[in-house]
Amino acid sequence: MKKRNIISIVIVAILVIIAGVLIANNRYLSSLHGEAADFTVYDTASITRLFFADKSGNKTLLERTDNGWTVNEEYRASQRMVNDMLYTLNRMRIKMPVSVKKSDNIITRMSGTNTKVEVYQMLPRINLFNKVKLFYHEKRSKVFYIGDVTQDNNGTYVLKEGGDKVYVVHLHGFRGFISARFSANPMDWRDHLIFAEPMNNIAAVKLEITDDPDNGFIIQEKDRYQYSMTRLNGQPVDYSENKVLTLMSSFGDVRFEAFLNDVDPARRDSIINSPFQQRLTLTTKDGRSRSVTTFRLRANSDIYDYSADDIDNFEDMLNDPDHQYALLSEGNEFVLIQDFAFGKLLKPADYYSKDYKDEIPQVYYKELETVESR
C-alpha cells in the first residue's frame, strides 16, 4: 500500500511539472505573439503609406493611390517591390528575443546603422469585438528600426521605437535575412517600366537610325490590326504581316535594366549630346508620345575579353553587344537597357520586308573541333 502511495505521488509530481512547463511555454509563446504585433501587419490591405529613412540621409515615402503606388509623391513605384514589402510585413515573425546584455550592444550598433520604418493604416476608431468597426481614419500604427543580420544570416535584428528589447525576426518560410528589403533609397523602389501599351491602343511606331537613315521607318494603324509601313524617306515597305504584328504586340511590358543617376553629370551630358544610335517613338491613340533614344556603350574589356588596345584602336566597332545607354523622354531619365529586351524593337525596315532572309550563322570545321563531346 505504501509503495502504491509513493508511485502515485511520483506520478502526480511529474504531471504537475509537465503542466507547469506547458503553462510557462504557452505564456512565453503568447507573449511573443503579442510582441509580434509590434512588427507584423496582418491586414496589409489597410496600409496606406510606408516610410523608410536611414542614417545615410536616404528617405522614401511609398503611398497607395487610385493609380497605384508612388515613390516620394512623384514617381511610379515598382508593384513587384511593393508586393514583396507587403508580403514581408505580413509574414515577418519574431524568432527569439535577445538577452538584455546582448540587446545593449546591438542597440549601440543600431544607433549608427539602421533603417527606420513607419507603417500607416486606415483603422477604425471604434472596434467592437472585431465585428463592428466605425469611423476609419489614417493612423501611424507601427514604428520600428531594422538593424544588422544575425551571425548565421538567418535573422534580422529589430527594435520597436522607444523600446529597450531587441528581437530577432525572420520571414516565415524563408531562409535568409530581410534587412535588404527595407531600403530607404528611393531609386530601389522606382518602377523600370518604359512602355506598357496594349496593341489596340497604339497609333504609330517610329524608328530613326542615325547611321542608316534609309532603314528608319514609321508604322501607322489604318484599321483594327491593319497597318501601313513606310521608310522615313517616304518609300513604302512591302512588309511581313507577322513581323509587324509581333512588333506591335511587344510594347505591353518593356523595361530598362537600371537607373544611371550616379554617372558623372559631365559624362552624361557628353553622351546624350553625341550622335544617337536609334530613337524609338511610340504614339498612342489619345495623342501621347514616348520615346527612347539609345547611345553607344563602350565594351568592357574585362567582361568581353577585349584588350584595352583593341578598344582604343577599334573604338567605333567594339560596342557592348548586350547593353546601351538610353535617354527616356519621360522625366529625361538616363538609364541602361538590355539588348535582350530592346533588340527586337530596334530592327531596321529591311528586317520587315517580305524579301528579307535571316542570316544563317556559318560554322567552320575548326570551330566544330573545339566543341567538347558529351
Image (cartoon, rainbow, N blue to C red):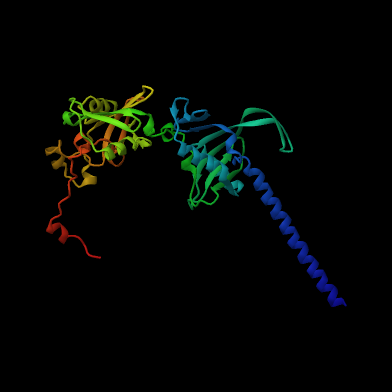
Q: Is residue 26 placed above or below 241 in the rendered structure?
A: below
In the shown orientation, is residue 248 left or right of residue 123? left
Foreground residue, 78 or 150? 78
Foreground residue, 91 or 180? 91
- Tell me what residue is drawn at x 16 percent, y 40 percent: 311
Residue that extends furthest to the right in the rendered view of this protein: 1
- Tell me what residue is drawn at x 62 percent, y 44 percent: 36
Foreground residue, 98 or 74? 74
> Residue 322: horizontal and vertical position, in percent?
26, 42
Foreground residue, 322 or 358? 358
> Residue 200: horizontal and vertical position, in percent?
38, 31
Q: Is residue 311 placed above or below 272 in the rendered structure?
A: below
- Tell me what residue is drawn at x 36 percent, y 23 percent: 288
> Residue 223: horizontal and vertical position, in percent?
33, 29
Please identify the quarter of the rendering in which residue 224 is found: top left
- Classify the position of the C terminus by image quarter: bottom left
In the shown orientation, is residue 111 left or right of residue 227? right
Q: Is residue 325 placed above or below 73 in the rendered structure?
A: below
Q: Is residue 108 visible?
A: no
> Residue 287: horizontal and vertical position, in percent?
36, 22
Number of marks present in the image shown: 0
